[in-house]
Amino acid sequence: MAALVADFSLLEGRFTAQEAKKVLHLLTDAKLRYHTERIITSSNDEEILQSKSRIQALKMLQQRINDFIDSETRDGRYITLHSVIQMEVLESEGAAVYS
C-alpha cells in the first residue's frame, strides 16, 4: 500500500527581523520543550541520548538563525518565511524515530 502524503502550510508571511526571530524561536522552543519532556519521561537510554543530541542541534540552529537574520537585515530589510509540514502516513514497522 502506498504511503499517504499531505502538505500543510505552517508559516507564510513577511516579517521584520525581530518578528522573524520571535516566530522561529517559538517554533524551535516548542521542539526544545518536546525533547526536554522526552528526557524526563523516558526510561530508554537511546531515546534520551537522541533527545540530548537534538537539543544541542536545536540550540545551534537558533544561534545560526540569529546570526543570519542579524547579518542580512542591518539595513531594515524584511524576511519572508515559508514553512510546509509534510506528513506521511506509513504502515507500522517498529519503533518510532523522533527528531
Image (cartoon, helix red, strand yellow):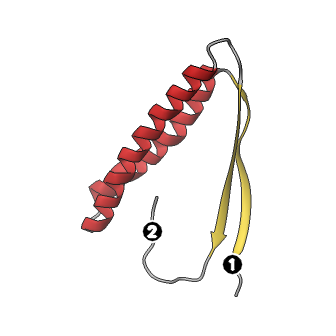
Q: Residue furthest bottom?
A: 1
Judged from the image, the secondary structure of the residue bearing numbered disc 1 is loop
Query: Picture coordinates of residue 45 (x, y %)?
Result: 24, 66
Label 1: which residue? 3
Residue 23: mark: none
- Dot 2 alpha-carbon crowd within 10 angstroms: few under 14, some 14 to 19, many 20 or more: few
User: As shown in the figure, which amino acid type bears the numbered disc 2?
Assistant: Val
- Upstream in the sequence, badge 1 or badge 2? 1
Identify which residue, 84 or 60, lies in the foreground: 60
Against 12, residue 4 (above or below) is below
Mark 1–mark 2 Cα distance, whole angstroms, equals 17 Å
Query: Picture coordinates of residue 29 (x, y %)?
Result: 46, 39
User: As shown in the figure, which amino acid type bears the numbered disc 1?
Assistant: Ala
Residue 43 in sight here: no
Q: In this image, 58 relative to 14: left or right?
A: left
Q: Are marks 1 and 2 in contact (CB under 8 Å)?
A: no
- Name the quadrant containing residue 3: bottom right
Q: In this image, 74 relative to 97: left or right?
A: right
Residue at figure coordinates x 61%, y 14% from the top left: 74
Residue at figure coordinates x 52%, y 36% from the top left: 26
Identify which residue, 72 or 42, lies in the foreground: 72
Q: In this image, 61 relative to 75: left or right?
A: left
Judged from the image, the secondary structure of the residue bearing numbered disc 2 is loop
Against 22, residue 11 (above or below) is below
Total numbered labels placed on residues in the image? 2
- Dot 1 alpha-carbon crowd within 10 angstroms: few under 14, some 14 to 19, many 20 or more: few
Query: Picture coordinates of residue 5 (x, y %)?
Result: 72, 69
Query: Picture coordinates of residue 69 (x, y %)?
Result: 58, 25
Residue 28 in sight here: yes
Q: In this image, 29 relative to 77: left or right?
A: left
Label 2: which residue? 97
Q: Quadrant of the N terminus?
A: bottom right
